[in-house]
Structure formats: structure tokens, C-alpha cells
């Protein structure tokens, strides 16, 4: 990734992107839809890697004509071997930027350090609230409701060796409403913040990478 060899088409340079997923892939779908709508002119969605087999995110990728592979962690003896396989795929596709979109496998410090400011993640709260180890999925929204915050949201940030601790790229606030459950709040945060923010952040970072 040190010497990015960007894709290009009639519209110009594009950063080659790998999206890492583990589940339903609604954030991946937001990226696919934004690309189709011409909202990410500097992003080339090249590869989707799932940490689990049979997840719907893989179908979404295939339906959009994106190469999609499952690399289940449990089929490797060690995290090192697992990450080596992922790195091989990233190198083969000359990936410039990695997007973690609901990726539930933990990446090692070595892996993260290999790609400084080349890995971004979406987290469903306003960092530094409700983030860090163990804060994923519904737990984030449960804790927000328990605390009684009136505003939550989503954050896109660069990934470094501290969980949810890398530089913030974009944030968007979402109101908590009377009677919210973790599920209703999760849905609103996705619809109003995550699906809007992630394509914007990817285009922002991809555009900067293309400028050099
Ligand atoms: C999202 O809430 C995202 O913020 C978090 O994991 C969830 C993924 O959902 N990191 P999906 O697979 O994109 O639907």
C-alpha cells in the first residue's frame, strides 16, 4: 500500500477499496448504492472479505458484481496465518483502503500498523462515548439508553491499535426518542447516520488518497 497504483477510468483516478464484513452488510449496501449513484467518484469497490461464511453481505457483494470471499478465522490455526491470507488477497488486488463495515474479527496490532490511515471503521455512537472493547452491536445502544443520553449517533474513524481510538473522520448526531429500545435506536442510527456517513467518509478519504 505504500505505492498505490490507483485504478482509473474515464472519470479519473480511483482508490481500490476492500470492505471487511461479518454480517448483514447494510453498510456495505450503502456503499454499493452510493457508488452506483455516482456519489463516490474516487472509490473503486474491488473486494469484500467476510470473517464468516454464508452471511448476506457476501450476497450483496456478488449481486453488485464485486469479488467476495469468506475467510473464516476458525479455519486458520493462528491469527497470524489468518491475517497473512488476508494480506495476500489485499496485495493481489492492490488495495489502497480497507473499510471495516460491521467486521467482528479483531485485527492484530501488526496488521493495523501495516496500514496507517488506510483502515477506516464505522462505530454506532459518538466517540468517545460508548466505545472501546466490548462495545459493538446492540450493546452500544443499550448502554446509551441506560446512561440516558438524549443524543447519540455514529462515527467514522481511522483504525489504530486502540479500539475505536483512531483519528475521527466524520460524525453525525441522532436524537434519542422517548420509548426507544436498543433495537429502535440501532435502526434510527443506521438509517440517519451510518448509511449516510460511511459513503461520505470513504469518498473523502479516497479522494485525498488519489490527490497523493
Ligand atoms: C453497524 O451497526 C456498524 O456500525 C457496526 O456493525 C454494524 C454492522 O451492520 N460496526 P451491517 O452488517 O452493516 O448491517
Image (cartoon, grey):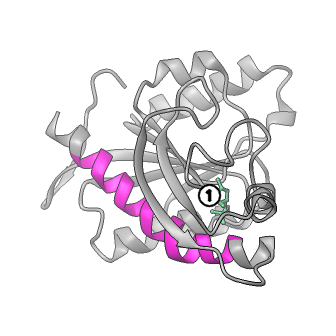
Q: Which one is nearer the viewer's eye here, 162 or 82?
A: 162
Magenta span contains residue 193: yes
- Point out the quarter of the image occupied by ligand 1: bottom right
Q: In this rendering, does residue 166 appear at all?
A: yes
- Asked whether, in this view, residue 97 is left or right of residue 10, the answer is right
Of the 4 image quadrants, the one containing the C terminus is top left
The quadrant where residue 85 appears: top right
Q: Which one is nearer the viewer's eye here, 89 or 122?
A: 122
Q: Is residue 122 above or below residue 190?
A: above
Q: Which residues are magenta?
A: 186-207
Q: Percent x, y for residue 113?
A: 51, 18
Quick one: SS at disc 1? loop
Q: Is residue 105 above or below residue 44?
A: above
The residue at the point 37 percent across, 53 percent down is 202
The quadrant where residue 15 appears: top left
Q: Is mark 1 within 8 Å of ligand 1?
A: yes
The kind of secondary structure the magenta stretch mainly shows is helix
The residue at the point 79 percent across, 70 percent down is 182
Q: Percent x, y for residue 96?
A: 37, 36
Q: In this rendering, does residue 44 appear at all?
A: no
Q: How many marks?
A: 1
Mark 1: few/some/many CA within 10 Å (<14, 14-19, 20+): many
Magenta span contains residue 93: no
Q: Is residue 25 above or below residue 170?
A: below
Residue indicated by mark 1: 124
- Asked whether, in this view, residue 101 is left or right of residue 82, the answer is left
Q: Percent x, y for residue 175?
A: 57, 75
- Asked whether, in this view, residue 112 is left or right of residue 91, the answer is right
Q: Percent x, y for residue 28?
A: 55, 63
The residue at the point 61 percent across, 31 percent down is 86
The residue at the point 47 percent across, 43 percent down is 157
Amino acid at each position: 500500500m505504500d505505492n498505490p497504483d490507483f485504478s482509473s477510468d474515464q472519470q479519473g483516478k480511483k482508490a481500490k477499496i476492500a470492505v471487511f464484513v461479518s454480517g448483514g452488510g447494510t453498510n456495505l449496501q450503502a456503499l454499493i448504492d452510493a457508488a452506483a449513484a455516482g456519489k463516490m467518484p474516487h472509490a473503486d469497490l474491488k473486494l469484500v472479505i467476510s470473517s464468516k461464511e454464508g452471511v448476506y453481505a457476501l450476497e450483496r457483494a456478488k449481486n453488485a458484481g464485486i469479488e467476495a470471499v469468506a475467510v473464516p478465522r476458525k479455519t486458520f490455526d493462528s491469527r497470524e496465518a489468518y491475517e497473512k491470507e488476508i494480506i495476500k488477497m489485499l496485495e493481489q488486488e492492490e488495495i489502497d483502503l480497507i473499510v471495516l463495515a460491521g467486521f467482528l474479527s479483531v485485527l492484530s496490532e501488526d496488521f493495523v500498523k501495516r496500514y496507517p490511515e488506510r483502515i477506516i471503521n464505522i462505530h454506532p455512537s459518538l466517540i468517545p462515548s460508548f466505545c472501546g472493547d466490548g462495545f459493538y452491536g446492540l450493546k452500544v445502544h443499550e448502554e446509551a439508553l441506560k446512561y440516558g443520553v438524549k443524543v447519540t449517533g455514529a462515527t467514522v474513524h481511522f483504525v489504530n491499535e486502540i479500539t475505536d481510538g483512531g483519528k475521527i473522520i466524520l460524525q453525525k448526531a441522532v436524537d434519542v426518542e422517548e420509548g426507544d429500545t436498543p433495537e429502535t435506536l440501532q435502526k434510527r442510527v443506521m438509517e440517519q447516520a451510518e448509511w449516510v456517513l460511511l459513503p461520505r467518509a470513504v469518498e473523502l478519504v479516497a479522494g485525498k488518497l488519489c490527490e497523493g
